[in-house]
Image (cartoon, rainbow, N blue to C red):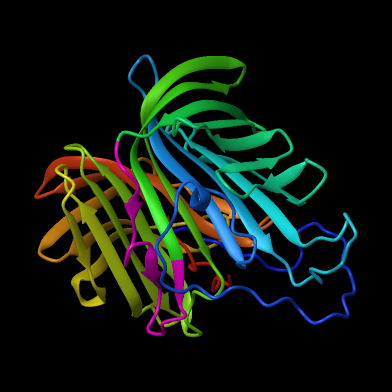
Amino acid sequence: MKRRTFLAGLGCTPLLVFAAPPVMAPVTPRPLQFPADFGAHPAYRTEWWYVTGWLETPDGKPLGFQVTFFRSATDHDRDNPSRFAPKQLIIAHAALSDPAQGHLLHDQRTAREGFGIAYAKEGDTDVRLKDWRFVRDTDGRYTATLAAREFRFDLVLAPSQPVLLQGDQGFSQKGPRREQASHYYSEPQLRVSGSIERAGKRLEVKGTAWLDHEWSTSVLDESASGWDWTGVNLDDGAALMAFQIRSKSGEKVWAHATLRDRDGHLTQYGPDQVAFTPRRQWHSPRTGATYPVEAVVRTGNAKWQLSPLQDDQELDARQSSGAVYWEGAVRVLRDGRPAGRGYLELTGYVKAMKL
């Protein structure tokens, strides 16, 4: 589940709008329909396509990577016929986790939708922000192409499993009230191939990735400050997703987890069956935030130990989405033995998140 704060000050010129704000669509249970639901849902307030994964270089070096495109509906009058009206914002983040660097390399962009420069198309996945693009082909493969300040990604992500519907057939509860929910599906165990470029050197890479696509209008409870989320590609072909919403006092507001085993059997875990227990913390020298970068996630009777590829995987996105959070590659152990690799996202540790 991804992170996802859209505040004032996104680099757009302030506009005076006198019309009533548009009514955003509420999230209600419904069957997801593909390929249409691979595409954008502009009637909802917030949406993101969130890709995280592990790569391996030819010499066996592990790298973590992240690519995220956001679409955010503004409060601008939707009946305004002007092509310049900022009805939707497109925001993009990209990050590379290389332990040899000692910290996360990342970049960010934002623009109002329009003129073919920035868009999130309906009907199937096709999102773009200038020369950054994430698109789904008719055969189900995704292509991620972007040139950041310190690196470049040219990656192809091929599905190896069916879509994983989170929650109740894609209706994912995020709080005690029914309206605190999103439509949410994942594509775990994506097979990654392609290349990255760093410091003028191009490397062929391969690996595995996890894709989340989520859209909502009202998610967080008023008492919530942020969330802890993990998506894990397990070594035996299974997939694990778990999250908890935290209150401003640090208590659990809501939680959920999904485990799909290698045979396709699905197990859902409710709030009382999911817990995140910190084991080690890291203090950011830049923001002063303290993050539980090593943790044990309990789902039912199972315990999963998460350990970071490197401690400093803090992402400062205040120039685009307004948020600062920790988002990094983690190794996963079960009963002390290697079990998989995934990503951990920790939000609301600098200040409370707002969607």
Q: Nearer the viewer, residue 237 or 335?
A: 237
Q: Considering the image in quadrants, where does the N terminus appear?
A: bottom left
Residue 152 included in the magenta stretch of the image: no
The percent coordinates of residue 342 (x first, y second) are 33, 44
The percent coordinates of residue 220 (x first, y second) are 49, 76
On the question of residue 262 being in view, the answer is: yes
The residues colored magenta run 161-182
Q: Nearer the viewer, residue 329 or 179?
A: 179
Image quadrant where residue 147 sits = top right
The percent coordinates of residue 22 (x first, y second) are 73, 76
Q: Decide whether the magenta segment is chiefly helix, strand or loop.
A: loop
Residue at image coords 80%, 57%: 11
Q: Is residue 151 left or right of residue 273?
A: right
Q: How many marks?
A: 0
Residue at image coords 27%, 58%: 295
Residue 115 higher or lower than 249, as above or below: above
Residue 200 higher or lower than 175, as above or below: above
Residue at image coords 75%, 72%: 75
Q: Is residue 292 left or right of residue 284?
A: left
Q: Nearer the viewer, residue 112 or 227?
A: 112
Residue at image coords 19%, 54%: 304
Residue 181 included in the magenta stretch of the image: yes
Q: Considering the image in quadrants, where does the C terminus appear?
A: bottom right
The percent coordinates of residue 314 (x first, y second) are 50, 51
Q: Is residue 271 left or right of residue 112?
A: left
On the question of residue 330 being in view, the answer is: no
